[in-house]
């Protein structure tokens, strides 16, 4: 969209109505900007805070996508007839980490809100916040004045560790249930399967402690499962059972091979961080492959974070990515 006179494209900061930064545990920041613009102008330009931006989205008040051009940190949005604009994107250039201390740093043209990761504790502020709010999910939201601001915080390591422990316990319980079925120990196994389902549900809700406890109980129930005392079957039924047992045995063998494979991956790549290991765990639990969106939902991580992790794992030859109906399908490499 060229040919517009420079006078017709105006730069604005004073028309920003709301500016919000949502900080995630891995340092990715989601930026949301609400602006009021002059609807008689064909376009306006805005400098991206924390450039480069990824997952950039520009809409009007009804959610209609607006055309834009992005060159370096300069965003030009074409808005003729539009008075309210929403800009959203992700960036990794507003945070850094030294030791256990994370810092969010920004030079903002207007007052803004920053929402810190869950369970974060503020250790230092460059300026007194205008307001401090605890959200319903217990995250801290600070409203800060315009200018150069810095917010330092720490996140207890136990949050990530517990999530990994829950994943490990779920995988262990699943293997124990398959083993019990292979050995014909089906008496009491329904309790184990019910507990495993509850563990997975708790994990999906983000209650990793309960997920771990339920998975451990599922494992114990599977270990205690017994063979029925009476097995009155016809030859045909016995044959059918034999086929079923062979199928389960085969599944158990495959699962054991996969487990050894992923443990071997962890030994050969000790530099993998917990989120990267968790992505591999999810793929293992789901049979060796899953859509990227399913991984994101299971781990409750931002889209950008999962995409970055998957691309890193791909570059190291640990996974392969293919397009299935326009979606990324991630598979553990053999």
Image (cartoon, rainbow, N blue to C red):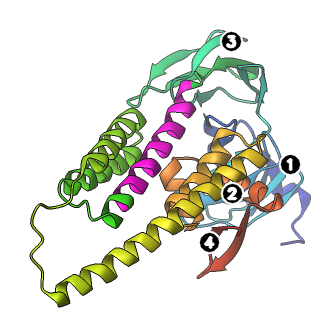
| Distance from the alpha carbon under mark 4 to that under mark 1 | 32 Å
Mark 3 vs 1, N-terminal side = 1
Of badges 4 and 2, the one in the foreground is 4
Of badges 3 and 1, the one in the foreground is 3
Asked whether 77 falls inside the magenta stretch, the response is no
Mark 2 vs 1, N-terminal side = 1
Report which residue position mark 2 lands on. Answer: 307
Q: Position of residue 194 (x, y in %)?
A: 24, 53
Mark 4 vs 2, N-terminal side = 2
Mark 4 vs 3, N-terminal side = 3
Say which mark, if any, is on residue 73: 1
Asked whether 169 falls inside the magenta stretch, the response is yes
Q: Which residues are magenta?
A: 158-178
| Distance from the alpha carbon under mark 4 to that under mark 3 | 42 Å
| Residue 12 seen in render | yes
| Distance from the alpha carbon under mark 4 to that under mark 2 | 11 Å
Of badges 3 and 2, the one in the foreground is 2
* Circle 4 residues within 10 Å: few <14, some 14–19, many ≥20: some
Of badges 4 and 3, the one in the foreground is 4
Quarter assignment of residue 1: bottom right
In what element is the residue under mark 4?
strand
Residue in view at x 34 percent, y 57 percent: 177
Q: Position of residue 120 (x, y in %)?
A: 56, 22
* Circle 3 residues within 10 Å: few <14, some 14–19, many ≥20: some
Residue in view at x 62 percent, y 34 percent: 25
Say which mark, if any, is on residue 118: none
Q: Position of residue 182 (x, y in %)?
A: 35, 66
Of badges 4 and 1, the one in the foreground is 4
In what element is the residue under mark 3?
strand
Report which residue position mark 3 lands on. Answer: 125
Q: Main secondary structure of the magenta part?
A: helix
Say which mark, if any, is on residue 329: 4
């Amino acid at each position: 969209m060229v040919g517009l006179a420079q006078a017709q494209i105006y730069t604005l900061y004073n028309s920003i109505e709301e500016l919000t930064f949502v900080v995630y545990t891995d340092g990715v920041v989601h930026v949301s900007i609400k602006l009021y613009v002059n609807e008689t102008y064909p376009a306006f330009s805005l400098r991206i805070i924390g450039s480069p931006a990824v997952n950039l989205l520009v809409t009007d008040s009804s959610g209609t996508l607006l055309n834009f051009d992005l060159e370096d940190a300069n965003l030009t949005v074409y808005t003729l007839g539009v008075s309210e604009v929403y800009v959203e994107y992700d960036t990794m250039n507003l945070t850094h980490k030294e030791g256990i201390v994370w810092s969010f740093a920004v030079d903002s043209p207007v007052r803004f809100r920053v929402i810190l990761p869950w369970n974060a504790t503020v250790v230092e502020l460059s300026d007194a916040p205008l307001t401090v709010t605890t959200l319903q999910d217990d995250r801290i939201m600070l409203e800060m004045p315009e200018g150069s601001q810095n917010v330092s915080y720490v996140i207890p390591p136990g949050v990530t560790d517990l999530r990994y422990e829950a994943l490990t316990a779920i995988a262990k319980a699943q293997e124990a249930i398959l083993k019990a079925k292979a050995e014909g120990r089906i008496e009491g196994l329904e309790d184990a399967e019910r507990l495993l389902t509850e563990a997975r549900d708790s994990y999906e809700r983000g209650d990793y402690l309960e997920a771990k406890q339920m998975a451990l109980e599922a494992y114990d129930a599977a270990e205690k499962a017994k063979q029925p005392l009476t097995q009155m079957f016809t030859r045909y039924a016995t044959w059918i059972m034999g086929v079923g047992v062979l199928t389960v045995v085969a599944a158990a063998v495959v699962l054991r091979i996969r487990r050894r494979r992923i443990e071997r991956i962890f030994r050969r790549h000790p530099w993998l961080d917990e989120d990267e290991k968790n992505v591999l765990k999810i793929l293992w639990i789901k049979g060796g492959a899953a859509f990227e969106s399913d991984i994101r939902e299971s781990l409750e991580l931002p889209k950008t974070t999962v995409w970055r992790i998957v691309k890193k794992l791909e570059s190291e030859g640990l996974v392969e990515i293919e397009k299935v109906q326009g979606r990324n399908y991630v598979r553990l490499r053999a």
